[in-house]
Amino acid sequence: MVIYEVTAEVDIAYRAEFEEFMTKHHISDVLSTGYFAHATFSRAAGRYRVQYMADSILQVEEYIQVAAPALRNDFLSRFPNGVMLSRENWDVISTHDGPINK
């Protein structure tokens, strides 16, 4: 499994709009491309992280070549300022489950 992670630093003036766009549009648009099976969206003190899970790096690379340009252009048309993005791929080495809380 590979995680394609997008991190965003968002100016305070754009945070509410950014969260709404990501939760109601962008993440589902990315998932609908078929390259990723699952995504998580997290926040910490004005920084956001989206982790998209794919079966292989080949799927991520194909997404970046085929589907990402249009989605990135849509994002930039809505947020030309106030959001700084970085992207990174992570290889999942292992996953672990803890005990179920009672």
Image (cartoon, rainbow, N blue to C red):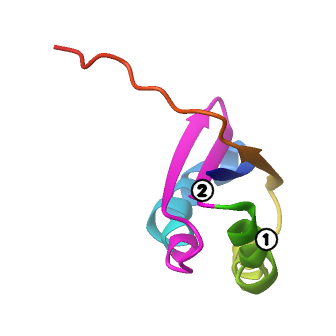
| Residue shown at the point (67%, 52%) measured from the top left | 2
Label 1 environment density (alpha carbons within 10 Å; few <14, some 14–19, many ≥20) = some
- The answer to whether one can see residue 10 in this image is no
Give the residue type at disc 2: Tyr
Q: Is residue 48 above or below residue 95?
A: below
Magenta range is: 29-55
What is the secondary structure assignment of the residue under circle 2? strand
| Residue located beneath label 2 in the image | 52
What is the secondary structure assignment of the residue under circle 1? helix
Q: CA gap, disc 2 to disc 1?
A: 13 Å
Q: Which mark is residue 61?
A: 1
| 98 drawn magenta | no
| Residue shown at the point (72%, 67%) measured from the top left | 60
| 37 drawn magenta | yes
Q: Position of residue 37 (x, y in %)?
A: 49, 63
Q: Nearer the viewer, residue 35 or 43?
A: 35
Q: Earlier in the sequence, mark 2 or mark 1?
A: 2
Q: Position of residue 34 (x, y in %)?
A: 53, 78
Q: Is residue 5 above or below residue 72?
A: above
| Residue shown at the point (51%, 55%) measured from the top left | 39
- The answer to whether one can see residue 6 in this image is yes
Q: Which marked residue is nearer to the observer: mark 2 or mark 1?
A: 1
Q: Quadrant of the C terminus?
A: top left
The quarter of the picture where residue 9 lies is top right
Give the residue type at disc 1: Glu
Label 2 environment density (alpha carbons within 10 Å; few <14, some 14–19, many ≥20) = many
